[in-house]
Image (cartoon, rainbow, N blue to C red):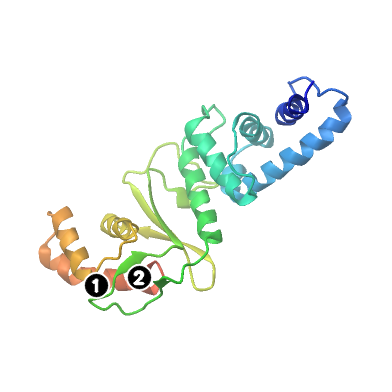
Amino acid sequence: MSFQQIQSSFIDYIRDPSHPLPVDTDTRHMQVYRELFFNNVEGFVGNAMPVLKSLYEEPDWLALVQTFFAEHDCRTPIFVEIAGEFLDFLVNEYEPGSADPPFMLELAHYEYLELQVAVTRDNPVFVRLDIIAAQDRLVLSPLARVAQYAYEVQHIGPDYRPTEPASQPQYFCVYRDDMHEVEFLSLAPLTAQVLNVLADGRGWQISELTEWCKANFPSLDVSMIEQGILPLLTQMAQKGIIRKLIA
C-alpha cells in the first residue's frame, strides 16, 4: 500500500469511523486522533454559532457536526473560516431533519455575520466621519454587513423558537463600533436598500443617492426623500456604519 493510500485511509477513518481502520493501527489510538480533530472542529463551530447550538439536544448537535465533519470538504485549514464552511455545508449539502429548526439557515447566517464583523480588519481607505459634505464619496464600512431575513433572528434563543416567518421581512445591519463591540441594528427597508447600494464600494455622493432613491422608490414623496436622506446618512455615519472613501 502506498503512502498516499495509507494517508487517505487514516483521514477517512478520522472523519468517519465506519471506514476500516488504517493498516497497523488500533481503535484505541485512532480514537484519540479522531477525538482531537472532531473536538477542535465542533468547538469552533459551537463557539461561532452559540445560539444555534443552544437549540439542540447534545446528541442531535453532535450528530449534525459529525455529518459536516464526515461529508464536507473544507477548502481552508484556517479555524476562523470553519464557520463559513459549516454555513456552506448547511446551505448546499445538508438535508434538514426533524431536529432542525425551520430558521436554521437564517440563524446560522446571522451568527456567521457576527463572526465576520468581529474578525474583519479595518481598512484605512475608508475614513470615519460624523458630518457629511456634499462632495464626500460614501461607502459601507468594511466592519458592517447588511442582511434580510424572514425570521426575527435577533430574538431567537432557547425561550423563543418561531415556527413561522415574521409578517414582514426583517432587515438588519451587524457592525463593529468604536469600542470593538459587535452591534445589531434593525433597519427600515429604505435604509437597508441604501446601505446595500453603498456596499458596492465605488463611493456615492449624497446627490447620487438622492436620485437613486427617487428612481427606485417612486411611491415615496420626493420632498421626503430630499429632506430625509442627509439625516439618515448622518445617523449611519455617526454609528460608523457609513465611511468616506479617500482613495
Taking 68 as reference, is 172 left or right? left
Taking 52 as reference, is 40 left or right? right
Q: Quadrant of residue 35?
A: top right
Crowding around mark 1 (Cα neighbors within 10 Å: few <14, some 14 to 19, many 20+) is some
Q: Nearer the viewer, residue 93 or 48?
A: 93
In the image, farthest residue toward the front: 2
Residue 245 is tagged as 2
195 versus 25 height, above or below = below
The earlier-in-sequence mark between 2 and 1 is: 1
Q: Position of residue 185 (x, y in %)?
A: 41, 61
Q: Nearer the viewer, residue 15 or 167?
A: 15
Tell which tag, 2 or 1, sits nearer the viewer. 2
6 versus 169 height, above or below = above
Q: Give the residue pinned by disc 1.
A: 230
Q: Position of residue 115 (x, y in %)?
A: 54, 54
Q: Amino acid at mark 1?
A: Leu
Measuring 83% from the left and 31% from the top, which residue is drawn there?
30
Crowding around mark 2 (Cα neighbors within 10 Å: few <14, some 14 to 19, many 20+) is many
Q: Secondary structure at mark 1?
A: helix
